[in-house]
């Protein structure tokens, strides 16, 4: 990857986590993919795309250390170091094409309560959506903060919010993860956490706060993110690199054809601990010391 990437692209990747002025996301087109891409898988399984996988992990290695979360993915994907994202109606989760994935950061440490948050992740399209409906939504935290009123930002820093799951059968409410502050870090480079739990047959989710001003500010932040986000139509050979601390992301709903021609993305997480990126929570914060990946226990019963 280092040998074949254009110089300006390589420089942008090298600066991605360490330069506070770097872009919050990179969209790279023309990445080599396999000459023959098999039909998009309709069911979970083990599918190999050697060239796609090589480029995905090669670029990830430029950024840091690629990794996966095996247990997190086994219900609707092949798991391991690389995850397949392809439409699987009826299985729930992020591969359900019928739902809009609202804005969120992946595995945020301030919610899951463990140092398992990726610094970033990569999405490489082996095949794009032929109907051009499926778009990855990317919202810069700086742009979002600029649209929020000072009183709203203060409310989001002041009072915590929490995710709750409401059981479909009984109506019982369970906390999901830990209460969290939606805005943290410095004013000129805030870490904004929006959160979303994909549709599930056993429960629905809601984001609530005991502070009415914080609740209203959070709901407004989600609305603004929808207004100002960039919609990325990933087609074959497109690579999207997202800084998980500086972006919230989502996805539009789409109608799959289920004939082997549907959208097929490959995803991997990246830990930049090898390069020790500057922390938005301060160089001496606990988040920047002894960073080790840990598996979170999310749904508390």
Image: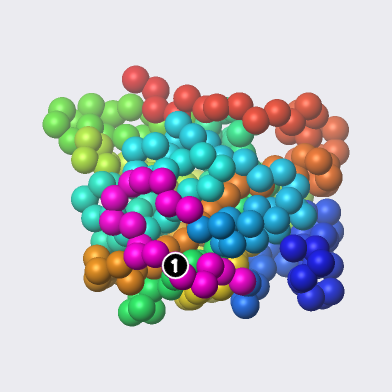
Q: Residue at x 35, y 63 (%)?
A: 40
> What residue is at 52 percent from the left and 27 percent from the top?
296
Position of 214 compared to 63: left or right?
A: left
Residue at numbered disc 1 = 37
Picture layout, residue 93 above or below residue 176: below
Location of the N terminus by quadrant is: bottom right
In the picture, which quadrant includes the C terminus? top left
Residue 73's place in the image compared with 54, above or below, is above
Instruction: Tell me where residue 88 sits by quadrant.
Output: bottom left
Q: Position of residue 176 (x, y in %)?
A: 41, 31
Q: Residues within 10 Å of mark 1 (few under 14, many from 20)?
A: some
User: What range of the chain is rendered magenta?
Assistant: 32-48
Return the residue nearer the eye: 238 or 148: 238
Q: Main secondary structure of the magenta part?
A: loop
In the image, is residue 238 part of the stretch drawn in magenta? no
The percent coordinates of residue 256 (x first, y second) are: 27, 68
Going 28% across and 29% down the picture, which residue do you hit? 173
């Amino acid at each position: 990857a280092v040998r074949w990437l254009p110089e300006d692209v390589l420089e942008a990747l090298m600066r991605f986590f360490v330069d506070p002025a770097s872009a919050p996301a990179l969209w790279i087109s023309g990445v080599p993919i396999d000459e023959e891409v098999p039909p998009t898988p309709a069911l979970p399984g083990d599918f190999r795309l050697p060239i796609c996988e090589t480029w995905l992990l090669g670029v990830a290695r430029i950024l840091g250390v690629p990794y996966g979360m095996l247990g997190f993915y086994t219900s609707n994907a092949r798991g391991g170091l690389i995850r397949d994202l392809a439409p699987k109606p009826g299985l729930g989760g992020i591969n359900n094409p019928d739902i809009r994935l609202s804005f969120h950061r992946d595995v945020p440490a301030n919610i899951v309560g463990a140092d398992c948050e990726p610094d970033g992740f990569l999405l490489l399209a082996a095949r794009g959506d032929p109907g051009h409906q499926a778009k990855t939504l990317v919202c810069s935290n700086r742009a979002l903060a600029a649209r929020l009123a000072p009183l709203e930002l203060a409310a989001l820093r002041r009072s915590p919010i929490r995710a709750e799951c409401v059981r479909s059968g009984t109506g019982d409410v369970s906390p999901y993860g830990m209460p969290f502050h939606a805005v943290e870090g410095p004013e000129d480079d805030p870490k904004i956490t929006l959160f979303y739990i994909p549709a599930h047959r056993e429960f629905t989710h809601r984001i609530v706060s005991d502070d009415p001003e914080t609740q209203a500010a959070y709901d407004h932040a989600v609305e603004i993110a929808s207004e100002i986000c960039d919609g990325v139509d990933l087609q074959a050979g497109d690579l999207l690199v997202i800084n998980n601390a500086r972006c919230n992301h989502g996805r539009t709903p789409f109608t799959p054809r289920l004939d082997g021609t549907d959208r097929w993305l490959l995803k991997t997480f990246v830990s930049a601990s090898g390069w020790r990126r500057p922390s938005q929570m301060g160089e001496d914060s606990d988040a920047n010391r002894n960073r080790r990946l840990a598996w979170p226990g999310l749904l508390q019963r």
